[in-house]
C-alpha cells in the first residue's frame, strides 16, 4: 500500500499559504510531490513481473529524483536556514559514522 502525502491542491487551500514566503511553501510542496512520485514508481516497479515495465517505472523514478534535486536547489536558495541545517545534519551523520 502506498503512503502518499495529502498536499492541498484546491485553490482555497493554496490561498492559505504564508504571505511572507509563499514561494518557499510552493517549492516544499513540489519536493513532497516528487518524493511521493519516486516512492510510487519504485513501488510499482517492485510489483511488476514484466522487466520492461519495471525498467520504465525505474527510469521515470530516476527522472523524478532529478526534479527533486531541482526543487531542493531552489529551496536552498530561498530558505537560508535549510542550507545551514543540511550542512549541520551532514556533519552529525559523519560524527555518528565515526562513532561505530
Image (cartoon, rainbow, N blue to C red):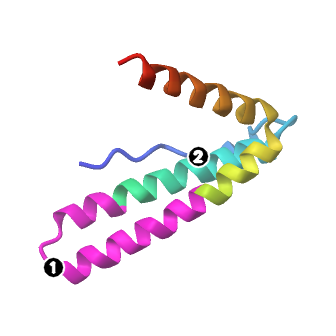
Residue identified by numbered label 1: 50
Q: Tag on residue 8?
A: 2
Question: Residue 32 location, x and y as percent?
Answer: 54, 47
Q: Quadrant of residue 19?
A: top right
- How many marks on residues? 2
What residue sits 33% from the left and 78% below the top?
Answer: 56
Q: What percent of the width, then of the height, locates residue 34?
A: 52, 56
Q: Is residue 52 magenta?
A: yes
Left or right relative to 96: residue 28? right
Indicate whether 61 appears above or below 6.
below
Cα separation between marks 1 and 2? 34 Å
Q: Is residue 52 above or below residue 43?
A: below
Towards the viewer: 69 or 15: 69
Q: Main secondary structure of the magenta part?
A: helix
Name the image quarter holding residue 86: top right
Q: Position of residue 55 (x, y in %)?
A: 29, 77
Q: Residue furthest bottom?
A: 52
Q: Residue at x 30, y 49 (%)?
A: 2
Q: Say which of marks 1 and 2 sits in front.
A: 1
Which quadrant is the C terminus positioned in? Answer: top left
* Residue 71: x %, y % from top left: 66, 54
Magenta range is 41-68
Q: Secondary structure at mark 2?
A: loop
Amino acid at each position: 500500500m502506498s503512503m502518499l502525502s495529502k498536499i492541498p491542491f484546491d485553490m482555497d487551500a493554496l490561498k492559505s499559504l504564508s504571505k511572507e514566503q509563499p514561494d518557499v511553501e510552493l517549492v516544499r510542496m513540489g519536493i513532497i510531490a516528487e518524493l511521493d512520485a519516486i516512492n510510487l514508481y519504485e513501488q510499482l516497479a517492485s510489483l511488476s513481473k514484466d522487466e520492461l515495465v519495471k525498467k520504465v517505472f525505474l527510469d521515470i523514478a530516476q527522472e523524478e529524483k532529478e526534479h527533486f534535486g531541482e526543487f531542493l536547489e531552489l529551496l536552498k536558495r530561498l530558505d537560508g536556514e535549510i542550507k545551514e541545517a543540511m550542512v549541520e545534519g551532514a556533519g552529525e551523520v559523519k560524527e555518528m559514522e565515526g562513532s561505530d
